Amino acid sequence: QVQLVESGGGLVQAGGSLRLSCVASGTFFRINTMGWYRQAPGKQRELVASISNGRSPNYVNSVEGRFTISRDNAKNTVYLQMNVLKPEDTAIYYCYVRTTMITGRNNDYWGHGTQVTVSS
């Protein structure tokens, strides 16, 4: 089992910045993909950014150039630096991790979410 602890959400004015962090702990052989999803009221959950070992990060078009995802494998931590925030970025942000067991089986885990609110 893997636990994900998110931090860094909050209230910020448009144009401001926030940095989200997510620490993974528990039993796994390797973490493959780490990422962030978000869900705004009345909307479906969408992938914001993801980063896999040995690959370039992926971003949804709406955050390209404003958000940066990074990871620290030694700390099992993924970060999301969010700059030039817009009111439409308001959502609950969920950390996502895909791990691999020594058997080769993949497992997906989600954090409880952290609220990001951008005021106009």
Image (cartoon, helix red, strand yellow):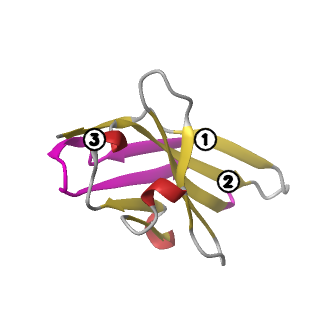
Q: Which residue shows up at 53% across the image and 58% down it?
A: 61
- Of discs 2 and 3, which sits in the foreground? 3
Q: Which residue shows up at 61% across the image and 41% down it?
A: 109
Q: Position of residue 51 (x, y in %)?
A: 58, 65
Three-letter code, disc 1: Tyr
Measured in 3D between alpha carbons, the distance from the residue under mark 1 to the one under mark 3, in whole angstroms, is: 28 Å
| Residue at image mark 1 | 109
Considering depth in this image, is 77 or 15 the residue closer to the camera?
Answer: 15
Q: Tell me the quarter of the image containing the C terminus.
A: top left
The magenta segment: 3-30
Q: Please give the label number shown on residue 14.
A: none
Q: Residues within 10 Å of mark 2 (few under 14, many from 20)?
A: many
Q: Which residue shows up at 19% across the image and 56% down it?
A: 15
Three-letter code, disc 3: Pro
Left or right of 33 on screen, residue 70: left
Q: Can residue 92 be found in the magenta stretch?
A: no
